[in-house]
């Protein structure tokens, strides 16, 4: 496959392993073989389920910062996540260490997330003056609710696997994450589908009281003291509530590009 991405089959569960030390950043030389592997597995009858895991000390801890400011090489992360969401068989992200930024967004593209108890999950882009640009502002509220998503994204502070159990992850394990992820994938396969991608989940959004959300966003905006990124993050999460998924995703991209350009 590639030195950065490998695929093994464990009794019908395809395990896709990213190996890009030190933090498994989503560099182009990871994205390309990852996309190719997922595209092949989508149509492979020998793969009944897919687990995405990482070698080394952490799950994907974000984008490759050496690529910032350079022309984007395809496939970009958004294309990989969009591909993931077309896979009808269960997809599981096995998270250890940290799942940050693009790493968490990749995990949000899976049907399920299983985490080691010591894992941390977050979208810290605001600390770089940006917002999540891979759909994080649109998918996260669908799992944890708009209020929790707003707090996570505007603060940029990661949460523990235990906290993430409230919607963001489906299971927390104390040991042998790879084996537990494969076991979980087998369990989901045996249970049967359909498996609903995060983009199609609306229950948590329907719980949102927009007036309460706006008050929370206004309070966070005051604390931001005029900084653009936190305000843009709040706008993006609000779009996830009020717009269709595709429209909110497009709006997120526009806000991201505006922050990158410094407009």
Image: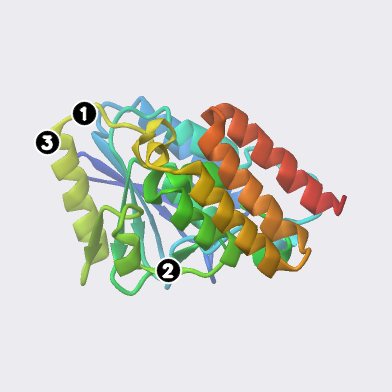
Q: Residue 133 carries which label?
A: none
Q: Element at badge 3?
A: helix
Residue 233, percent from left and from top: 64, 53
Q: Which residue is drawn at 62% across and 63% down?
A: 220
Residue 38, percent from left and from top: 43, 37
Q: Bin the neighbour count of mark 2 within 10 Å (Cα to Cα): few under 14, some 14-19, many 20 and up.
A: some
Residue carrying label 1: 193
Instruction: Say how many tags the image has.
Output: 3
Q: Residue at x 39, y 51 (%)?
A: 144
Residue 108, percent from left and from top: 43, 46
Q: Which mark is residue 159?
A: 2
Q: Residue at x 19, y 50 (%)?
A: 184
Using residue 132 as the reference point, say whether residue 210 is left or right of it. left
Residue carrying label 3: 190
Q: Bin the neighbour count of mark 3 within 10 Å (Cα to Cα): few under 14, some 14-19, many 20 and up.
A: few
Q: Distance between the residues labelled 3 and 2?
A: 31 Å
Q: Residue at x 67, y 69 (%)?
A: 223
């Amino acid at each position: 496959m590639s030195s950065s991405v490998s695929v093994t089959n464990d009794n019908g569960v395809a395990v896709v392993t990213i190996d890009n030390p030190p933090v498994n950043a989503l560099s182009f030389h990871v994205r390309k073989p990852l996309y190719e592997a997922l595209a092949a597995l989508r149509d492979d009858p020998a793969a009944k389920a897919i687990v995405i895991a990482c070698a080394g000390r952490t799950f994907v801890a974000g984008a490759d910062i050496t690529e910032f400011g350079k022309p984007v090489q395809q496939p970009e992360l958004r294309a990989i996540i969009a591909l993931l969401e077309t896979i009808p068989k269960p997809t599981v992200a096995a998270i250890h260490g940290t799942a940050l930024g693009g790493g968490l967004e990749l995990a949000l593209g899976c049907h399920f997330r299983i985490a080691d108890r010591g894992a941390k999950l977050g979208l810290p882009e605001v600390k770089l003056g940006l917002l999540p640009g891979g759909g994080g502002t649109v998918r996260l509220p669908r799992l944890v609710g708009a209020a929790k998503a707003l707090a996570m994204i505007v603060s940029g502070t990661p949460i523990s696997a235990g906290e993430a159990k409230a919607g963001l992850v489906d299971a927390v394990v104390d040991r042998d994450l790879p084996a537990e992820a494969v076991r979980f994938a087998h369990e989901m396969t045996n249970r049967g589908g359909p498996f609903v991608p995060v983009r199609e989940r609306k229950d948590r959004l329907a719980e949102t009281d927009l007036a309460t959300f706006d008050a929370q966003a206004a309070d966070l905006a005051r604390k931001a003291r005029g900084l653009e990124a936190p305000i843009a993050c709040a706008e993006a999460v609000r779009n996830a509530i009020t717009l269709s998924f595709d429209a909110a995703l497009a709006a997120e991209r526009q806000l991201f590009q505006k922050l990158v350009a410094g407009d």
